[in-house]
Image (cartoon, rainbow, N blue to C red):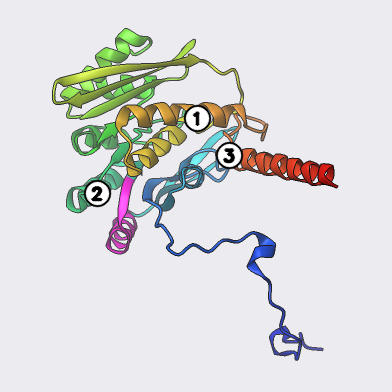
């Protein structure tokens, strides 16, 4: 017996009124800002491309991506890295840029010198706005995510091309050659990154006893700095915090916000994503990138309950 073709059966047509499902059709659809993320693939979705796409969606932007490497990893660490052909990366980036108006770019794990060269060449030609460089060099489990030649080329090519560079303490130390363990050393590292061509720098200190982020940015008056402090959250769900911060910052820049406001909002987003994280896996779990969806559902449920109670009281 063959499978019946349900589309050809003589069944009555059923119309589904939009109002039943709460759909609203406006007179004009507003196009969301398009944010491009260039990064590796983490199959556990705590970091990398899939985490970036979730973060972009959480900020009401539209995410497009280019995968630089495949990894074998879970919450328990990175086991293996396999880079993508740089020509495929270059072709992918050119295809996306020719079709879409990209408002911001997030650069994450690049993997090797050839990929850095391909990405730098693309950015030099395309002149895309709001490039946020998250210089991912090593996994928390100790696996190199960018080779030494790639790191040197990143400093030479990508640091000057980026609107803002967002290293954590260890990354800032590698990029500048100085120890970075406190606020004074963060200031010194930021100054050295400026000397290397960085226009704006955020050194993230989430691993300090007091979570401190230092923003060092260029203005018409010269270089200015702002310090963002918060209590350190004791959580086992912190995998991908740097990716989420840098991607969220790219989204805020794409939406027209200034750098200090963007840093503040990105830091608040990461803190809330940690607070609302669900325990997953046997290692370092991921943030809850889409925690706002749960908050919206709870608010909607509360409004519905209040409406029902109000209707009941009228009866």
| Residue bearing the label numbered 3 | 292
Spot the residue most to the right. Answer: 315
CB within 8 Å, label 1 to label 2 = no
Quarter-of-image position of residue 85:
bottom left
The answer to whether residue 111 shows anywhere in this view is no
CB within 8 Å, label 1 to label 3 = no
Quarter holding the N terminus is bottom right
Of 36 and 16, the residue lying toward us: 16
Whole-number angstrom distance, CA of label 3 to CA of label 2: 29 Å
Name the mark nearer the viewer: 1 or 3: 3
Residue at image position (36%, 39%) is: 250
Q: Earlier in the sequence, mark 1 or mark 3?
A: 1
Q: Earlier in the sequence, mark 1 or mark 2?
A: 2
Question: On the picture, is 115 further left or further right than 192?
Answer: right
Residue 285 against residue 88 in the figure, above or below: above
Q: Which mark is residue 120?
A: none
Q: Secondary structure at mark 2?
A: loop
Of 71 and 275, the residue lying toward us: 275
Whole-number angstrom distance, CA of label 1 to CA of label 3: 12 Å
Residue at image position (50%, 41%) is: 80
Measuring from the top left, give residue 273's x and y in whole percent.
Answer: 56, 32
Residue 274 against residue 124 in the figure, above or below: above
Measuring from the top left, give residue 297's x and y in whole percent.
Answer: 66, 43
The answer to whether residue 4 shows anywhere in this view is yes
Q: Can residue 98 be found in the magenta stretch?
A: yes
| Residue bearing the label numbered 1 | 270
| Residue bearing the label numbered 2 | 128
Residue 209 against residue 283 in the figure, above or below: above
Q: Secondary structure at mark 3?
A: helix
Residue at image position (28%, 41%) is: 131
Residue extent of the magenta highlight: 86-104
Question: On the picture, is 305 further left or further right than 99?
Answer: right
């Amino acid at each position: 017996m063959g499978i019946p073709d349900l589309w050809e059966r003589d069944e009555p047509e059923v119309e589904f009124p939009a109002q039943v499902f709460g759909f609203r059709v406006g007179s004009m659809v507003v196009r969301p800002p398009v944010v491009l993320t260039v990064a590796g693939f983490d199959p556990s979705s705590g970091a990398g491309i899939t985490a970036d796409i979730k973060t972009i969606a959480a900020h009401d932007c539209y995410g497009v991506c280019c995968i630089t490497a495949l990894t074998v990893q879970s919450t328990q660490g990175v086991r293996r890295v396999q880079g993508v052909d740089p020509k495929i990366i270059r072709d992918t980036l050119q295809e996306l840029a020719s079709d879409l108006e990209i408002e911001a770019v997030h650069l994450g794990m690049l993997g090797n010198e050839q990929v850095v060269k391909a990405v730098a060449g693309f950015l030099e030609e395309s002149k895309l706005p709001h490039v946020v460089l998250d210089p991912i060099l090593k996994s928390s489990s100790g696996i190199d995510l960018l080779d030494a030649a790639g790191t040197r080329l990143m400093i030479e090519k990508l640091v000057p091309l980026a609107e803002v560079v967002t290293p954590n303490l260890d990354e800032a130390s590698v990029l500048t050659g100085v120890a970075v363990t406190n606020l004074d050393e963060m200031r010194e590292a930021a100054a050295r990154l400026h000397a290397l061509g960085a226009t704006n720098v955020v050194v993230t200190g989430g691993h300090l006893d007091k979570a401190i982020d230092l923003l060092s940015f260029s203005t018409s008056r010269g270089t200015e700095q702002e310090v963002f402090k918060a209590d350190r959250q004791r959580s086992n769900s912190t995998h991908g915090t740097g990716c989420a911060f840098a991607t969220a910052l790219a989204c805020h820049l794409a939406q027209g916000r200034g750098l200090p406001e963007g840093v503040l909002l990105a830091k608040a987003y990461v803190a809330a994503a940690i607070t609302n994280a669900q325990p997953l896996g046997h290692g370092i779990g991921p943030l809850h990138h889409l925690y706002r969806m749960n908050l919206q559902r709870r608010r909607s449920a509360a409004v519905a309950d209040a409406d029902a109670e109000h209707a009941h009281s009228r009866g």
